[in-house]
């Protein structure tokens, strides 16, 4: 076969069988009955191989082509192309099915090292003839072995793919020209499909350079997901019904009706006016959808001149502000990144600072809010001792800026964008047999698909974000530039993040469940990753000498995270030199695409469905004086009914799990064939199950349970 430098022996199908496997066989059909296809003895010196080709269970996995072929490449010889079906009139390969073949050869293939599958272009069935293969089992009658070759890949119309059985790093196959050729040809083919798109004017990490409809088949939404996503978008008609019901919004009760238009939130903020309470505001800073802004305050910023007399009534330990700062009871949220952003016509926002205090009851509460960065007579510091309307309005303007920063920086930039960049680095440089590929591939599912759609409809010029957010298009682009320039990959390393922000001490800052659950999840992932890495890398020298792995680092440093106004690499190293460094990077990528994204995404409907609690735009400029606000001011400051309805619809869509979601620790694609690796995968799943039970128990006495880091609700990858 071309490129493999082994002779081809005469081969044909002696026997074939085409069957479906049951819904209860979640891991595919057993290999037990494959043995029955083998002959009782070997006749005439021929060699026999039992081959089972298993097609996936997802929609569209089967193919109508009928020209599919398989090639076995062994250490001594190869078969050439062998038709899988018997001819044009054969029943097509359906999803959740398998084909058993008895391949008879006139010569010994030796150990089968590579399986190649092809799906030739069929002009009669020109559309929808992609084929998703889970794996291939091979029984070698001569060697008395059964080997599984994981595939888990869409074979497009007119395409072919090859794959191996063992998990290996490059060092393990350097002496084997067949395996070396298979690895390099896989990477060469992928690099033709996965090309970089750089965003020099926006400052985002690089992405794949194709429109959503032209993505590689492995990155596309499956049919079920495509339907769900389209249906969710159509569901915005619910908001049209709401906007038709009211000429104008003139009461908070109408916002409550909007908050339930698409279903009641799991933890509604409007019940018993919870959204107006300072304890609830503090809870949202710790355990809402943007829990990564809060920092310990050891000294007040010069542009935030809060005095002891201002906040003394809000602190209940009898200490001065200076002493409370030293004791570690004062925290700050500073959204200076929002300062000076352009605003769309009719939209208003702020660049606020908020000082928070852990009181004797161990509750975090806000004690001072300044809505602009530069202090002055027209920029008062709002306090809990002000009128209820003044203080509530100040919190609303803070939340408006907080929400916009959350969507652009915390959610899209730090999760969506960077996970696509990581995926590109892996897909362009690692073959499917590489342990890092197998470890991380489940955490990239659908990410390129959802990001491509977001770039086309959500964060594009004139898209939904530009219409709903106060900062509009120009402000959004500038916020992306600022966030992209400042971005560092360690933002989503929760161990480093909570320490650098000074919020790592649960005695000083209790009730920070994002931190508590996130650190436990990180540790579980890190332990799992370490066991997999240590299984395949014996030493730091193995890591340094793995040129495929080093190509990932070089590609991401140079092309994935270019300078774009900030530091090149943005924290990603030029090279990976130790096992410890590799373990941390793999854990970081896994955590970012699963736990971090889930924590900042799936609570959006809870947070944003009730517009007075948090909105993306205001209709009046931030208050410049105290004493003028009343309840009517609160209503008039909030967005109009159309903008409010669109914002709630977006938060609803983004909070929905899909029907075919895959959750952390659940890996239907069993890419690792080695016993030790499979044991570690099973142990990881058990660890997560136990952690989930612990979180459920912890949540029982809480007024508002923290559920976004429950492993059973953490998705493997970014799919929405």
Image (tube, rainbow, N blue to C red):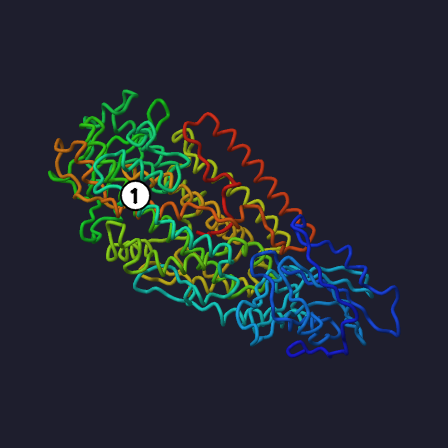
- The quadrant of the rendering that contains the N terminus is bottom right
Residue hosting label 1: 242
Q: Position of residue 581 (x, y in %)?
A: 51, 52
Q: In front here: 167 or 50?
A: 50
Q: In the drawing, does residue 175 fall left or right of residue 522? A: right
Residue furthest out toward the left = 377
Q: In the drawing, does residue 26 fall left or right of residue 604? A: right
Q: In front here: 653 or 549?
A: 653
Q: Residue at x 82, y 71 (%)?
A: 47
Q: In front here: 236 or 141?
A: 236
Q: Position of residue 322 (x, y in %)?
A: 26, 29
Q: In the drawing, does residue 406 fall left or right of residue 380? A: right
Q: Residue at x 36, y 60 (%)?
A: 455
Q: Could you say which quadrant of the image residue 52 lies in?
A: bottom right
Q: Could you say which quadrant of the image residue 250 lies in?
A: top left
Number of on-image labels: 1
Find numbered disc 1 in the image and state the secondary structure of the residue it sits on: helix
Residue 286, compared with residue 13, is above or below; it is: above
Residue furthest out toward the top = 318
- Crowding at mark 1 (Cα within 10 Å: few <14, some 14-19, many 20+): some
Q: Position of residue 404 (x, y in %)?
A: 30, 47
Q: Position of residue 416 (x, y in %)?
A: 41, 54
């Amino acid at each position: 076969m071309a490129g493999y430098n082994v002779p081809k022996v005469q081969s044909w199908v002696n026997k074939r069988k085409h069957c479906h496997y049951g819904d209860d066989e979640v891991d595919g059909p057993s290999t037990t009955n494959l043995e029955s296809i083998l002959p009782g003895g070997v006749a005439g010196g021929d060699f026999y191989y039992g081959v089972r080709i298993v097609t996936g269970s997802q929609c569209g996995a089967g193919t109508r082509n009928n020209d599919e072929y398989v090639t076995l490449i062994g250490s001594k010889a190869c078969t050439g192309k062998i038709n899988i079906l018997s001819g044009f009139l054969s029943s097509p390969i359906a999803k959740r099915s398998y084909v058993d073949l008895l391949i008879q050869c006139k010569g010994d293939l030796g150990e089968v090292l590579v399986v190649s599958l092809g799906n030739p272009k069929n002009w009669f069935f020109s559309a929808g003839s992609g084929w998703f293969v889970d794996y291939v089992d091979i029984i070698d009658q001569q060697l008395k072995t059964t080997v599984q070759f994981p595939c888990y890949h869409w074979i497009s119309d007119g395409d072919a793919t090859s794959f191996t059985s063992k998990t290996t790093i490059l060092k393990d196959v350097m002496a084997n020209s067949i395996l070396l050729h298979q690895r390099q040809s896989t990477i060469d083919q992928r690099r033709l499909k996965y090309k970089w798109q750089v965003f020099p004017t926006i400052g985002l990490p690089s992405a794949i350079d194709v429109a959503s409809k032209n993505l590689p088949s492995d990155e596309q939404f499956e049919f079920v997901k495509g339907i769900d996503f389209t249906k969710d978008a159509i569901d915005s008609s619910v908001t049209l019904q709401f906007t038709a019901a009211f000429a104008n919004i003139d009461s908070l009760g109408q916002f409550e009706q909007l908050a339930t238009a698409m279903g009641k939130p799991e933890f509604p903020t409007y019940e018993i006016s919870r959204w107006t309470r300072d304890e609830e505001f503090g809870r949202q800073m710790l355990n809402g959808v943007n829990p990564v802004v809060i920092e310990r305050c050891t000294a007040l910023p010069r542009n935030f001149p809060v005095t002891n007399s201002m906040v003394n009534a809000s602190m209940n330990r009898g200490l001065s502000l200076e002493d409370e700062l030293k004791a570690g009871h004062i925290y700050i949220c500073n959204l200076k990144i929002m300062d000076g952003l352009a605003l769309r016509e009719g939209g208003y926002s702020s660049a606020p600072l908020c000082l928070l205090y852990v009181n004797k009851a161990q509750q975090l509460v806000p004690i001072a809010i300044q809505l602009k960065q530069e202090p002055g007579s027209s920029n008062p510091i709002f306090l809990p001792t002000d009128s209820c309307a003044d203080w509530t309005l100040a919190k609303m303007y803070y939340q408006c800026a907080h929400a916009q920063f959350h969507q652009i920086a915390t959610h899209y930039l730090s999760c969506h964008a960077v996970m696509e960049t990581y995926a590109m680095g892996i897909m362009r440089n690692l073959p499917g047999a590489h342990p890092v590929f197998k470890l991380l591939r489940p955490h990239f599912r659908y990410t390129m698909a959802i990001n491509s759609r977001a770039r086309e409809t959500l964060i594009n010029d004139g898209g939904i974000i530009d219409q709903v957010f106060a900062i509009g298009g120009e402000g959004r682009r500038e916020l992306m530039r600022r966030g992209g320039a400042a971005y560092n990959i360690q933002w989503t390393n929760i161990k480093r993040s909570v320490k650098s922000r000074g919020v790592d001490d649960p005695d000083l800052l209790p009730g920070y469940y994002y931190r508590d659950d996130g650190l436990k999840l990180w540790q579980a992932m890190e332990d799992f990753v370490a066991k997999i890495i240590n299984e395949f890398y014996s030493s730091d020298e193995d890591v340094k000498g793995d040129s495929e792995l080093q190509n990932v680092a070089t590609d991401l440093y140079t092309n994935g995270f270019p300078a774009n106004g900030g530091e090149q690499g943005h924290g990603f190293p030029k090279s990976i030199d130790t096992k410890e460094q590799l373990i941390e990077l793999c854990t970081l990528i896994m955590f970012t695409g699963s736990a971090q994204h889930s924590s900042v995404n799936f609570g959006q409907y809870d947070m944003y469905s009730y517009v007075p609690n948090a909105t993306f735009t205001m209709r009046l400029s931030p208050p410049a004086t105290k004493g003028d606000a009343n309840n009517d001011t609160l209503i008039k400051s909030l967005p109009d009914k159309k903008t409010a309805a669109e914002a709630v619809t977006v938060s609803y869509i983004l909070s929905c799990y899909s029907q075919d979601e895959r959750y952390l620790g659940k890996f239907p694609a069993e890419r690792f064939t080695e016993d030790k690796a499979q044991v570690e995968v099973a142990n990881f799943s058990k660890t997560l199950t136990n952690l989930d039970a612990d979180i459920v128990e912890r949540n029982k006495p809480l007024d508002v349970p923290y559920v976004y880091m429950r492993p059973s609700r953490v998705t493997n990858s970014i799919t929405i």
